Image (cartoon, coloured by chain):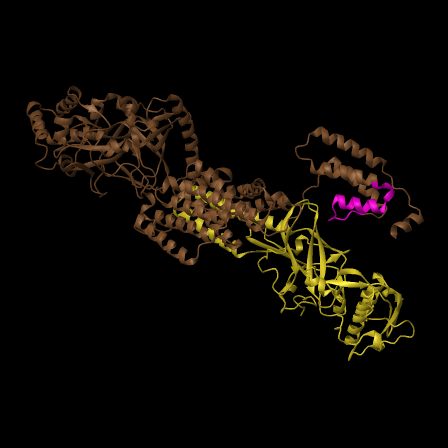
Chain colours: A yellow, B brown
């Protein structure tokens, strides 16, 4: 006997989301075509339906011909508004902006560029990462925005990061209830975007490379080499608290990090074997801390990992190269 | 410019304005404190928004709510019944304004507002009410749009933030619903109401003839310009003095008042012999909450669902509570009830004893002087003509012996005075007689070739029974005021300012205007308000096929509706054609040229931002790039209201610039420098 039907491999009854068709990215763009748009009445939609029934019964009971007409006008209005709500979401194109890496524990920010290609202004569109019941929940006002006809709007979606490495943007739920809030229209989209999560730097109290990381060459950096103060820059995550100008912050100038001259002159090898972590993750964390510190102190530093070695250098590109290597180790 | 407070205010004002329109209609019909109650709370709510007053707390709202409910109860004596429950609903909506804050509150208020607005139709279904309802619906929908849009980040799509844009979108949504409305209106199977009992007060506003008559009844009715019915004639319209529209026939005399005979229907109908040509007509009767169907003296066939009483009065089985339309055929020449049954003889001679002694004496005197009933009738009419009797809408009040007082003392009266005293005289003289009430005459509307008969045409006359001739109509009013019968009530009353303005003759232009308006109204009544199960079926039979039965209508509706929705969906959901204006086209050419160097304008990038980026990348041509971009963006923003000629000049200039714009090959060196 032949099987009645085949379920897709990823079909799970436990997760209702798998019942929905989900828009897939093609060439970096995901299009919310009509096959991906779902619509259901909101509780206000049901209330409106109740109103229509009440008006119809009233018109029959009192034989109000004009009452029939007005009831039918409002019924037609309901149907029309359904189409309008639907088309407010349909055929939007979603592309992703390149992401910027963040440290684990910070929010990964995904920037969605949502473009209208139907020459129609869109209003009150919301986008959020899909969770178990998104799609059915009522709209939160905060994440809505308008998109002008043939233009694009940018949504910034934040995702709390926990682990180092690449994190893929989860499925995104788009929704709208404009123009009359009687219908909830939603669509799920996968996007082709990932964000690199750098390891979380360990706490400062742990050993620093100056005492333990004995490289083959190079001068010992003077970690407390804060002799030649040259100025301030805004505090960045990972900056040593010792470098924070607490006096300035007490004057309510915000967190400022002190900068010192001559730091880039010394060279430092940051070696995985020199770490004191109990496991790989802790060691990586420690290395990350050293990289961050070395960069903020403008040292010239190299990174030596079990399978990879990065020659000493300095500057933004080098800094990120090192962190990426740590993130993906 | 469009901050949150302005939007909140817009949202509130849309709601308040549209509810105000609806309450204006209520003011005309619920003539009491309820609309003022709304105005008070609407103002309060407005001030909360405007002056940032706090919202009233529950301990304040709760007592006000109870007080509102009690006030309705005190005014109407009940919370149920049509007017009371509407008033209660209106009061509660006004109170709910004080706790309307969130998105949810506003949406619920709009839905309640829709309900309140459509319910104004319980009071009136006149054409003008469409205007107020439409305005209110557009306003409420605009409120709904603003509410649904609230909180959205708008960047450049600011065009939804003006009153005009909101009203336009609301209007579009409703306008697009009109085809669906029309289809449903014509095809939705009409179920004749009512489904359940209708509150007693539902028809309180209806006027018409009653089943009894007292002096003052009909003259009261004559002050109303309301339309009683309209009559279309298939043949020539009979002269005015033949237009006696028969209503309740009154037999029982009890002191001042006259009543119809018993409701029994098993008394044999009086014999009727007709002669001469028949008159065919169609009557559109306004609802009057009674059973009478008015027909021309004397009808020979009956409308559906109607019966004829023994005295030739046509009644329907149900009270007339909606406007109905029926065909009639009458003969103006007839012989009615040549044989008088004993039952009718007793009824038609009945008088209360010991009343109106002077009248009885006069009748006795005539009986002793004259022999034949015809002479007695003549004597009575002569009395009305020769003595100074006056036909007036404002007769003095009559004393305890009303007929005596009228005939020998006041001598001023309206048709009911003449008819009742005449019948009294006849009965006292031993001649069987009865009063017939109804309408006399009517106003010809030349536009539609039909007669408008108003409540002010209400009339009462007499019928006396003569051996060999049967029941003969005698109209004593015509003796006093022949004009009343020959040319209508307006010409008969010197003090016509008592009459409703439209029944008078002094404003010919106004009258003409009114007659035009009335023919529109008549069509409205026939085709919109009178559209019922029967009309629906007739229409479909005419359009589709004779074989259609009521059960098919549902199927037809579904088919037509699906087709319609498919058409509407196609037009609403297709991609809008992108029409580029010539300036944009030239700009796109420019972008294409730049794209060859790998410089692509991103979708979310503004024109100016892109020009900066491009200028940086191509420093040699920076000035050209900036010039083109500025020209383009200025033309885009200055478009509205700008003279056409200005645009033309911009276009020429832009074309020139783009044409001359050539990407210069960058050599390796430059490329490196730029990249660096």
Task: Identify which residue, B407 or B180, lies in the foreground.
Answer: B407
The residue sitting at 93% across, 46% down in the picture is B667
Q: Quadrant of residue B628?
A: top right
Left or right for B237, reference A41: left
Q: Main secondary structure of the magenta part?
A: helix
Q: Could you tell me residue A40's position as x and y percent?
A: 57, 56
Q: Could you tell me residue B97's position as x and y percent?
A: 45, 50
Q: Relative to B1, does residue B399 appear above or below in the rendering?
A: above
Give the residue furthest to the top.
B386
The residue sitting at 85% across, 62% down in the picture is A315
Q: Quadrant of residue B587?
A: top right
Left or right for A112, reference B110: right
Q: Could you tell me residue A5's position as x and y percent?
A: 66, 66
Q: Relative to A13, does residue A148 appear above or below in the rendering?
A: above
If the image is split into quadrants, where does the N terminus of chain B sit?
top right
Residue B603 on the magenta span: yes
Task: Identify which residue, B259 or B274, lies in the foreground.
Answer: B259
Give the residue furthest to the bottom.
A278
The residue sitting at 23% across, 26% down in the picture is B392
Left or right for B112, reference A145: left
Task: Identify which residue, B322 or B33, lies in the foreground.
Answer: B33
Residue A107 on the magenta span: no
Q: Could you tell me residue A204's position as x and y percent?
A: 76, 73
Q: Relative to A146, does residue B446 appear above or below in the rendering?
A: above
Is residue A78 visible in the rendered image? The answer is yes
Q: Quadrant of residue B62?
A: bottom left
Please count the marks in the image. 0
Residue range in magenta is B600-622
């Amino acid at each position: 006997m032949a099987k009645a039907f085949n379920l897709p491999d990823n079909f799970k009854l436990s997760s209702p989301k798998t019942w929905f068709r989900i828009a897939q990215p093609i060439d970096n763009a995901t299009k919310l075509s009509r096959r991906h748009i779902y619509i259901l009445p909101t509780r206000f939609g049901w209330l409106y339906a109740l109103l229509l029934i009440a008006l119809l019964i009233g018109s029959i009971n009192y034989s109000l011909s004009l009452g029939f007409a007005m009831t039918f006008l409002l019924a037609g209005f309901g149907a029309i508004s359904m189409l309008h709500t639907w088309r407010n979401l349909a055929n939007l194109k979603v592309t992703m902006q390149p992401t910027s890496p963040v440290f684990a524990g910070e929010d990964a920010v995904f920037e969605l560029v949502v473009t209208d290609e139907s020459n129609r202004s869109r209003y009150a569109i919301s986008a959020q990462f899909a969770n178990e019941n998104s799609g059915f929940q009522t709209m939160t006002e905060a994440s809505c925005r308008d998109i002008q006809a043939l233009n694009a709007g940018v949504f910034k979606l934040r995702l709390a990061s926990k682990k180092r490495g690449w994190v893929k943007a989860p499925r995104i739920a788009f929704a709208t209830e404009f123009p009359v809030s009687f219908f909830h229209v939603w669509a799920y989209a996968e996007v082709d975007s990932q964000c690199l999560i750098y390891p979380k730097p360990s706490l400062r109290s742990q050993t620093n490379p100056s005492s333990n990381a004995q490289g083959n060459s190079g001068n010992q950096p003077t970690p407390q080499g804060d002799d030649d103060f040259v100025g301030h820059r805004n505090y960045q995550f990972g900056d040593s608290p010792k470098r924070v100008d607490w006096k300035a912050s007490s004057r309510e100038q915000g967190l400022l990090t002190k900068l010192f001259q001559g730091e880039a002159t010394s060279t430092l090898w940051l070696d995985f074997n020199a770490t004191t972590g109990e496991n790989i993750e802790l060691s990586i964390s420690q290395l990350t801390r050293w990289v961050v510190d070395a960069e903020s102190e403008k040292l010239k530093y190299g990174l030596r990992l079990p399978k990879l070695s990065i020659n000493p250098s300095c500057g933004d590109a080098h800094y990120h190269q090192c962190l990426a290597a740590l993130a993906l180790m | 410019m469009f901050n949150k407070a302005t939007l909140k205010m817009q949202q509130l004002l849309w709601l308040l304005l549209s509810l105000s329109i609806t309450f204006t209609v209520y003011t005309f019909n619920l003539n009491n404190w309820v609309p003022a109650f709304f105005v008070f709370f609407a103002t309060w709510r407005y001030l909360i928004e405007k002056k940032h007053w706090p919202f009233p707390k529950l301990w304040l709202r709760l007592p006000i709510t109870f007080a509102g409910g009690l006030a309705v109860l005190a005014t109407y004596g009940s919370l149920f019944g049509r007017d009371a429950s509407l008033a209660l609903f209106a009061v509660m909506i006004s109170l709910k304004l004080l706790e309307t804050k969130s998105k949810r509150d506003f949406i619920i208020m709009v839905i309640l507002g829709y309900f309140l607005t459509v319910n104004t139709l319980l009071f009136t279904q006149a054409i003008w009410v469409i205007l107020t309802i439409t305005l209110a619906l557009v306003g409420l929908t605009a409120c709904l749009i603003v509410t649904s849009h609230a909180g959205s980040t708008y960047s450049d799509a600011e065009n939804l933030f003006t009153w005009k844009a909101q009203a336009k979108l609301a209007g579009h949504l409703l306008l697009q619903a009109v085809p669906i409305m029309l289809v449903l209106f014509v095809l939705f199977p009409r179920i004749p109401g009512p489904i359940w009992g209708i509150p007693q007060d539902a028809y309180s506003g209806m006027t018409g003839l009653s089943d009894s008559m007292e002096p003052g009844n009909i003259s009261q009715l004559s002050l109303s310009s309301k339309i009683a019915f309209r009559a279309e004639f298939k043949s020539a319209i009979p002269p005015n003095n033949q237009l006696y529209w028969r209503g309740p026939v009154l037999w029982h005399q009890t002191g001042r008042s006259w009543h119809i005979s018993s409701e029994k229907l098993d008394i044999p109908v009086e014999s009727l012999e007709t002669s001469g040509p028949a008159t065919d007509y169609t009557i559109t009767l306004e609802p009057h909450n009674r059973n009478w169907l008015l027909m021309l003296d004397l009808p020979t066939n009956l409308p559906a669902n109607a019966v004829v009483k023994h005295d030739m009065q046509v009644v329907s089985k149900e009270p007339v509570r909606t406007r109905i339309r029926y065909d009639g055929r009458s003969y103006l020449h007839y012989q009615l009830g040549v044989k008088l049954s004993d039952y009718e003889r007793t009824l038609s001679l009945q008088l209360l004893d010991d009343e109106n002694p002077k009248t009885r004496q006069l009748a006795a005197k005539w009986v002793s002087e004259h022999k034949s009933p015809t002479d007695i009738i003549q004597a009575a009419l002569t009395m009305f003509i020769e003595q100074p009797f006056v036909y007036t809408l404002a007769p003095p009040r009559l004393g305890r012996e009303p007929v005596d007082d009228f005939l020998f003392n006041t001598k001023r009266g309206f048709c009911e005075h003449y008819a009742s005293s005449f019948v009294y005289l006849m009965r006292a003289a031993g001649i069987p007689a009865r009063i017939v009430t109804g309408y006399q005459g009517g106003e010809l509307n030349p536009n539609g070739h039909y007669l408008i008969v108003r409540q002010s045409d209400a009339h009462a006359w007499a019928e006396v029974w003569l051996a060999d001739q049967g029941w003969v109509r005698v109209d004593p009013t015509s003796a006093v005021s022949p004009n009343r019968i020959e040319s209508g009530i307006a010409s008969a009353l010197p003090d016509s300012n008592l009459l409703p303005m439209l029944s008078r003759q002094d404003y010919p232009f106004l009258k003409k205007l009114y007659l035009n308006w009335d023919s529109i109204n008549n069509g409205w009544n026939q085709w919109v308000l009178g559209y019922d199960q029967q009309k629906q079926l007739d229409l479909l039979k005419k359009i589709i096929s004779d074989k259609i039965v009521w059960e098919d209508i549902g199927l037809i509706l579904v088919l037509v509706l699906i087709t319609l929705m498919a058409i509407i969906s196609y037009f609403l959901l297709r991609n809008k054609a992108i029409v580029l204006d010539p300036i944009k086209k030239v700009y796109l050419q420019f972008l294409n040229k730049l794209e060859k160097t790998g410089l692509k304008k991103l979708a979310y990038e503004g024109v100016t931002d892109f020009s900066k980026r491009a200028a940086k990348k191509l420093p040699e041509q920076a000035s050209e790039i900036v010039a083109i971009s500025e020209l383009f963006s200025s033309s885009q923003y200055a478009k509205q209201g700008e003279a056409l000629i200005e645009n033309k000049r911009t276009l020429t200039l832009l074309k020139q610039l783009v044409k001359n714009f050539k990407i210069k090959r960058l050599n390796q060196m430059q490329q490196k420098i730029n990249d660096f």
